[in-house]
Image (spheres, grey):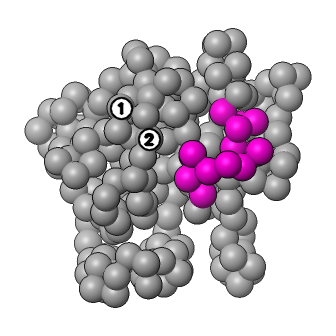
Amino acid sequence: MAQLGILLCDDHPAELVAETGSYDQAFLRMFAAVGYVPTSVAVWRCFEGEMPSAADHCDNFLISGSKWSVYDDEPWIKELVEFIRQGFNDGQRFVGICFGHQLIHHALGGEVGPAGFWGLGAYPVDVVQPFASFRAGDSLKVLAVHQDQVKTMAAGVQRLAGSELCPNAITASERLLTVQAHPEFSDQIFMDVTGRVKERAGDALAQNALSKLGEVDQREEIARWIADFIEQR
């Protein structure tokens, strides 16, 4: 039994993999930065057709970001949606990051659609319910890259933080934890991703996001909260 199953819905381009490792390594580095090492880890490259079966039980599944949209007509996305539904019904716990955040809500009855803007960079969201070290009214920032967002949350999930533009940025329930942003992104990964989307997002927005790299954000606090969720602390 693996303590943590990482469900990859994309990977970095080959040149970035050569420098930083595959996408699952970014999550493990994120955890290591806050002093957490999962007891055991299993990885499935879902976007390449690898899927856990009912026999591949993990205490927690972490669903990564992706360049795809949850409503794209891809067989692996449909299969992963069914896996989330079945796993949740069976009592398993899920963490969703960006695409994973959206896919969990989509699978469990929420609505996901185009945001109408590019969420690019560490834009602020406001805490509406206390969680981790944050109090209601606090503002926090984590690097983000997205065009879609959760419009309507799945039933039974609580909104913890959001903004006028992205109302459902961080959500949770007893067995779900989802974040629209990317706490696992290093500055290097963010720079690479931004370089690849800037033509679509707009050069001005991309340059503004890159100019703010190095400012204080809350990646580590969110990473620690995710680790505590996995450990059920």
Circle 2: is it few (<14), some (14-19), or many (20+) Cα within 10 Å? many
x%, y% of residue 144?
Answer: 39, 61
In the image, what residue occupies the spot 57% across and 29% down?
107
Residue that numbered label 2 is attached to: 112
Q: Residue at x 53, y 24 (%)?
A: 108
* Residue extending furthest toward the left: 137
Q: Are marks 1 and 2 in contact (CB under 8 Å)?
A: no
Q: Is residue 211 above or below residue 30?
A: below
The disc, 1 or 2, on the residue closer to the chain's N-terminal end is 2
Report helix, strand or loop for mark 1: strand
| Relative image position of residue 161 (x, y in whole percent) | 26, 39
Toward which corner of the image does residue 119 lie, by quadrant?
A: bottom left
Task: Pick the residue in front: 81 or 91.
Answer: 81
Which quarter of the picture shows residue 104?
top right
Instruction: Decide if residue 34 is in sight here.
Output: no
Q: Which mark is residue 109?
A: none
Instruction: Please give the name of the residue rendered at 48% of the width and 84% of the height, measured from the top-left corner.
Output: 195
Left or right for 168, reference 200:
left
Q: What element does badge 2 sit on? A: strand
- Residue 193 image point, x, y percent: 51, 75
Q: Is residue 92 above or below residue 73?
A: above
Image location (x, y in percent) of residue 229 = 50, 29
Where is mark 1, residue-wise? 152
Quadrant into which the N terminus falls:
top right
Identify the amino acid type marked 2. Answer: Val
- State which region is magenta: 68-81
